Amino acid sequence: MSDVPKTNLLGLTKARMEAFFVDLGTKAFHGRNVLKWIHKHGVVDFDLMTDLPKALRELLKDKAEIVTPRIVLDQPARDGTIKWLLELSDGQHIETVYIPDGDRSTICVSSQVGCALDCSFCSTAQQGFNRNLSVAEIIGQVWLASRMIGRPPTNVVMMGMGEPLANFDNVVPAMDLMQEDLAYMISKSRVTISTSGIVPALKRLRGVSDVSLAVSLHAPDNALRDQLVPINRKYPLEELIPACKQFIEHDRRRKVTWEYVMLDGVNDSIAHAKALIRLLQGVPSKVNLIPFNPFPGTLYRTSPPERVEAFRQRLMRAGIMSMTRKTRGDDIDAACGQLVGKVHDRSRRHLKRIPIVQEHRP
Ligand code: SAH
């Protein structure tokens, strides 16, 4: 046994995997095979990787490991949504949500333990920030979900706990793996990064990762957005909007998806809709209205459905495509803004424990 810590192969992109195998003194194509074993077949035991020479398998056991997050709770909602509570190797917890919808299946992936951004309507913010997830911990959520549902998801949204652009260096390689042909083969338009608007990181992302962009807007002017999404004080709308427009301008089919949580009496009037229409003028846009999902201790209320619909109609009349996001999994606190990565006593009672996923054969 060497003293050098073992490399967790789960978090290596194709290029890094190839380099790892070359550094071991063997061929890059073994690396590509291992990538397939791990992500396509779910195999985490080197002895089951039958196309690797025996000596290489022994070397790998010495130098490498494949460590996946562990599911500690499996919480199915009435609508088919499932929320998994995952335990990481240092004992921290995060949540991942699986949202089936006909032929589509979407995994909502977390990027951090907690979140530092303090949006006033989000329950993840209440728990504060703990740490960034590693590449392995991010892609590990897709790995686990694929094993649990028996196939890769059709879509991934980086809309779980955390601000993905605040963990740029790990989120980008993880999103590469989602799209990688030897791994999950999800097309770039079906991988969506959602951000509260960290403008310098968004500019850096341009040209590095061509994924779909969703932005948590929630207000049509700086005064209100400063209150709801405090990062706006650092990167106000006049910087955010052009940066988003630039992100998609290389492809005329692209639109920015603006997320807009509907808070009763706060941001949901027709005047707000009109201001939003003015703000988005000239930006290829789609607006997703999200009915506010309440959580214990919040002072906000959900806008009445008629008001949400009137707001939506106003946007549509101005030629802005707009839909109201269906609330999914709210009976298990799996909906937008409800992820907290800890076990509530309240919800624990009716949850079943599932065996820990150890090993999968192709
Ligand atoms: N931090 C990233 C990723 C979170 S995505 C971001 O801000 O984009 C989750 C989406 O749900 C975001 O648009 C977020 O603003 C929204 N959200 C947060 N809390 C919510 C709540 N209680 N009800 C509805 N939507 C909420």
Image (tube, grey):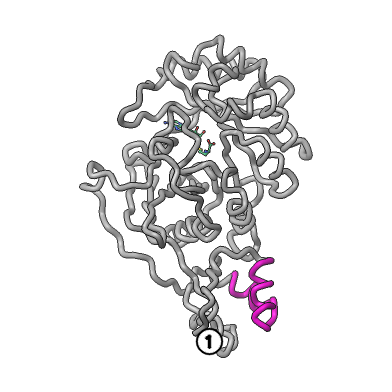
**Tag 1 residue:** 58
Of all residues, the one furthest to the front in this rendering is: 3
- The image position of residue 217, as x and y in percent, is 57, 27
Label total for image: 1
In the shown orientation, is residue 166 left or right of residue 256?
left
Of all residues, the one furthest to the left in this rendering is: 349
Of all residues, the one furthest to the top in this rendering is: 271
Secondary structure mainly formed by the magenta segment: helix
Label 1 residue SS: helix
Q: Which residue is drawn at 71% across and 39% down?
A: 203
- Disc 1 marks which amino acid? Glu
In the image, 264 versus 331, the foreground residue is 264
- Asked if ligand 1 lies within 8 A of label 1, the reply is no
Q: Which residue is drawn at 61% across and 13% down?
A: 275
Q: Does the magenta stretch include residue 34?
A: yes
In the image, 10 versus 326, the foreground residue is 10
Residue 160 versus residue 181 in the image, above or below: above
User: Would you identify the image quadrant in which residue 92 lies?
Assistant: bottom left
Q: Does the magenta stretch include residue 276?
A: no
User: Would you identify the image quadrant in which residue 215 lies?
Assistant: top right
Q: Which residue is drawn at 56% across and 34% down?
A: 196
User: Would you identify the image quadrant in which residue 334 lies?
Assistant: top left
- The image position of residue 126, as x and y in percent, is 39, 35
In the shown orientation, is residue 354 left or right of residue 143?
left
Q: Give the range drawn in magenta.
A: 15-35
Q: Which residue is drawn at 49% across and 26% down?
A: 261
Q: Is residue 30 visible?
A: yes
- The image position of residue 211, as x and y in percent, is 66, 45
Of all residues, the one furthest to the bottom in this rendering is: 55
